[in-house]
Image (cartoon, helix red, strand yellow):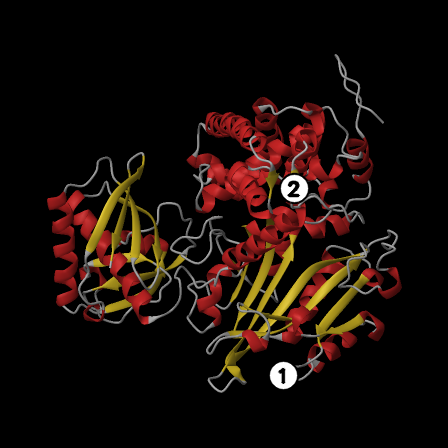
Amino acid sequence: MHLIYGRIRSISIVEISIVYNKYIMKMTHQELRSAFSKFWISPPRRHVEVQVASLMPKDDATTLFTSSGMQHLVRNFEGMPHELGRRLFDIQPCFRASDIEEVGDNRHTTFFEMMGNWSLGDYFKEDQLAWAFQFFTQTLGLPKEKLYVTVFEGGCGVPKDEESTAIWKKLGMPENRIIPYPASKNWWSRAGVPDEMPVGEIGGPDSEIFFEFDVPHDVRYSQHCHPNCDCGKFLEIGNSVFIQYRKKADGTLEELAQKNVDYGGGLERILATLQNNPDIFQTDVFSKIIGNIEEVFRQNYISEHASSIRAVADHLKAATLLILEGVTPSNKEQGYVLRRLLRRSMLKQHHIVGTISSDALISVCLDGVIPTYKDVSFLKKLLENNTSHKTLISSVVKQEVDRFAKNLKTGMSMISTMQKIDGKAAFDLYQSYGFPLEIIEEICLQKHISLDTQGFKREFTKHRELSKKSSSGMFTGGLADHSAQVIKYHTATHLLHRALKDVFGAEVRQEGSNITAQRLRFDFKLSRSPTQPEIQKMEEIVNAKIKEALPVHFKILKKEIAHSLGASSFFKEKYADMVKVYFIGGSEGDPSTAYSKEFCGGPHVSNTSEIGPLKIIKTKKIGSAMIRLYAQ
């Protein structure tokens, strides 16, 4: 089927599919969110919803983005009380930079939503597996006969998870659909399998749920097909992790006193199961976006360009949300990832239609992405903070298209001067100018230049592995690690924040921080650059409070009470009704007398004398009314 343009455009195949599927789809993405929330709030489960975190975690030096629902709860798994209690859930927007190159098949995305529930030392395997099974089969109505489950087969000094196997059998799961796997598939810790866990790391076995689609097996895998293979018939839709072990100094694992549950299931994947279609790009979180791409690119989704259209749909969705989070394209950190998303979208556009048009890309963002999520709470919040979002998105995309057009011209000029291109040079063209291998190959073919394709692939693989390690992070609640020095610096940021207010008044506002064992970095909003005498005064105030040996303590309070006490909060965060507030100075009986009062999850030193002298080593302006301070 081809699209007919003029006054009337014919309905595309993907649109027909969506129209048809509305009769067999059981839920829209909004209905699925509502069903998940109601399920975990209702008795006997009685969970409390956690406010979702920003896509860019505050105070985290180890990872650029929020890539899972549990990322901000690690300290709670280790025993620190959560202000909302021991039973929690949320639907967390996530971004995984390491998946950029994978996008193009029917299931990989960079942006996704993780539906999660947690038990912090409360219920464990029996309740969790029963409730997960109930949600999928009773609340969502998925046929039991289309579900498979996996369990940990044992290894690395940990026995087979017979308990989970017995629970699944009790729930009616046939033995031939309970599949054991080794630690490489059915174990979770931040470091990986048990043998790779550092001393003190926590983790445990998991049990995954898979859905079997009514589609043919991929012939490459059909002879040895199983739920965790790549045959195309199976999709993981939920994973219950049982965090019950800690690594000891002698290399063995010990049982935790507090055993936890960490469950996560991808909203987009679950939607796909509800229409029995393994292509998540044909669910309603993509239908408007894909439809818009079809129109502005004048190309059907069901065509040889499906893979490229998927990439554009995913990348522009993620790019739109990052722009609204305040990210701008650059060559570093989050800005570099945004630049990659936009430039990959341009290259896919060029591949499909032969040109690059900022108007078409902007239309996908404004007429596809925004309408899809306009009623979802996380986008509502972003739009409230960006009242002129159309101008912002249009400006960022257009500027990046213009820049890339210059890079394209520069890169073409560079290639024309080369006699041959080795692997490193080809990868430099890819990384610095955004040229994918297929474009480099095409140019080299036209200009009769030899190209080391295998060398490029080696460099690419090396870069990808480093990117995966970088993006996975340690998820340590805002710090590079929990070393003594990092904790000292983290506590010092509270003193800095209050000292800033002492010097500049109420107008100053924290915008973020990045803390490692070598230094602390603190970003704040100020209408002008601070003078050297003002910086010196801040430093003197902080060191005076350190010398006073002030006690550091916290209380869990109602948000209104915390605000009435004058506690500072992070501007971009949306807090729950009950919050944890750290006080520096004063007494636990009368926290109103504290020098510093701030919403925070910890960890901190117990007394400011532990911090030691602090020196502000540099300040610089990093944007409009934005100052970055470094100290050590």
Looking at this view, is 436 or 485 the one in front?
436
Picture coordinates of residue 419, whole percent (x, y): 60, 36
* Residue ID at (78%, 65%): 148
Is residue 278 among the parts visible in the rendering?
Answer: yes
Name the quadrant containing residue 137: bottom right
Q: Which structural element holds mark 2? A: strand
Picture coordinates of residue 117, whole percent (x, y): 58, 62
| Looking at the image, residue 6 lies above or below residue 103 | above
* Real-space Cα separation, disc 1 to disc 2, in angstroms: 49 Å
Disc 2 residue type (three-letter): Leu
Q: Which structural element holds mark 1? A: loop
Q: Quadrant of the C terminus?
A: bottom left
Is residue 171 among the parts visible in the rendering?
Answer: no
Picture coordinates of residue 314, whole percent (x, y): 63, 40
Q: Nearer the viewer, mark 1 or mark 2?
A: 2
Q: Estimate how packed mark 2 is, as few (under 14), some (14 to 19) or many (20 or more) residues with alpha carbons within 10 Å.
A: many
Looking at this view, is 424 or 118 the one in front?
424
Disc 1 residue type (three-letter): Val
* Residue ID at (45%, 35%): 384
Task: Specify whether 438 is left or right of 496.
Answer: right
* Residue ID at (18%, 52%): 499
User: Which label is found at residue 158?
Assistant: 1
Looking at this view, is 167 or 7 the one in front?
7
List the residue tagged with mark 2.
451
Disc 1 or 2, which lies upstream in sequence?
A: 1
Task: Specify whether 489 is left or right of 585.
Answer: right
| Looking at the image, residue 202 lies above or below residue 32 | below
